[in-house]
Amino acid sequence: YIAMPKFNLYQSLHTTVVGPGGAIIEVQIRTEEQHQLAEFGVAAHWRYKSGDDKDMPWLDRMLDWQSETADPDEFMESLRGDLEHDEVFVFTPKGDVVTLPIGASPIDFAYSIHTDVGHTTIGAKVNGRLVPLDRPLESGDTVEIFTSKLDAAGPSLDWVSMVVTPRARNKIRQWFARERRDDAIESGREALLDALRRANLPTNATLGSAALLAIGEQLGYSDLESILVAIGKKHLSPKSVAQRLGRELRSPDTEQQLAAPSLQNRTRRKRRESGVHVDGFDDMLVRVARCCNPVPGDDIMGFVTRGRGVSVHRTDCTNAVELAASQGGRLVDVEWDSGFEGSYVMSIDVKALDRSGLLAEVTQAMSDSHVNILSAKTLTGGDQVSTMHFEFELVDPSHLEMLLRKVRAVDAVFEAYRSVPSQSDKGD
């Protein structure tokens, strides 16, 4: 510990010798200054270094923990644990030394490099070999971290039990606190939209309206997001909000405005089963192209086929690009029908380290998101990475991100994302 002091600045030479009669004797060799620091703690540093402005890494880390930990008891427990831990010295692939407590895992290592590295970790190599993320590191190990490039990548809640450093533990908890808020917003939005439909109020026009924001302010919520979080966390009843909105909006003039869109939407749902409106061709057969499976939220274009109505493609679909170049005269403007009530076919790809029960847990996570799985394919390579492809029906495509979060939360899954079917159905 001379060249690389422990986290609490402890320095000493340690050795063990065998004495007379086989007795084992531990010897510690240190200077007077090092002895004072060992006996009286880090405060002794200033007795010998008064006026020295040298940065102290342990103090910087302690201040970081204090800013990240709201609970004073948790902060003191983290500080006490780190001061008492023995340490291991591991290396980055570039040869830089990283000091961690004994028992630290590759996840601790990743968070010690950078918070974003920790959040996006999907695997690790130690001394050139792929290892589980909970494998304890040892002095002399060279650690390489693999990260995901997906914007939605994030840690697993199981990681909290795999880490020993306060920094990693706090960063993981902070990430999930933000995620819980996002989930509350999503579930609050769904609950409020459902309550508005039951009250026969227009969902798109009402959500985010001045009337809703005014009701929120009366109840102590400053913006739409705060209202949705309160509903999602069961602190506010969506039914009572819808009832208040009904009283606010249903003046004679407003009722007439509310009724007209409702009748129009009912007519649209009866005429169009695809969920797509073709400008100027309300009675034309419309179907979604299987080559790219567009869903609401995707930019789309229509192509008039020979005898099979209008085929709707994503604008970035390879087939659509070729059709636009070769038969541009048969393109028509299309848009999503906001009043459509039906389901859409979507696909996702999932990658994970293979293990027993993996497929069952992934399909259970999807089932919990209320989707109807149409097909599933899985393939495991020689590197023990399992690749799974699922095709399923989803009523509201905006729920896809929530489904992907649940799938990514399954142990050993490191990637899950929407996939587009292969561009093979040309001219469809």
Image: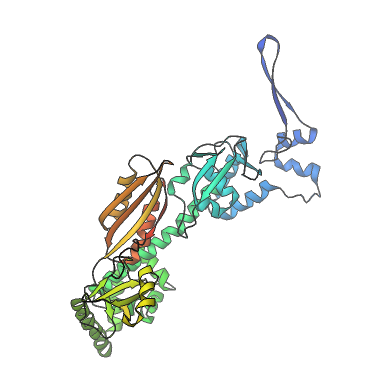
| Residue 410 percent across, percent down from the top left | 38, 48
Q: Which residue is outermost to the left?
A: 270
Front residue (pair 405, 344):
344
The answer to whether one can see residue 187 in this image is no
Give the quarter of the image for residue 330: bottom left
Q: Is residue 70 left or right of residue 43?
A: left
The answer to whether one can see residue 318 in this image is yes
Residue at the (34%, 39%) spot, across then down: 356
Residue at the (47%, 45%) spot, across then down: 160
Image quadrant where one finds the N terminus:
top right
| Colouring chosen for the image of the structure | rainbow
How many numbered discs? 0
| Residue 97 percent across, percent down from the top left | 66, 42
Front residue (pair 3, 188):
3
Q: Is residue 66 left or right of residue 46?
A: left
Front residue (pair 159, 344):
344
| Residue 422 percent across, percent down from the top left | 35, 61
Task: Please determine whether, in this image, residue 97 is positioned above or below residue 373.
Answer: above
Q: Which residue is outermost to the bottom?
A: 253
Image quadrant where one finds the C terminus:
bottom left
| Residue 75 percent across, percent down from the top left | 56, 48
Residue at the (79%, 36%) spot, across then down: 33
Q: Which residue is outermost to the top?
A: 21
Q: Is residue 191 left or right of residue 32?
A: left
Give the quarter of the image for residue 347: bottom left
Task: Please determine whether, in this image, residue 428 is positioned above or below residue 363.
Answer: below
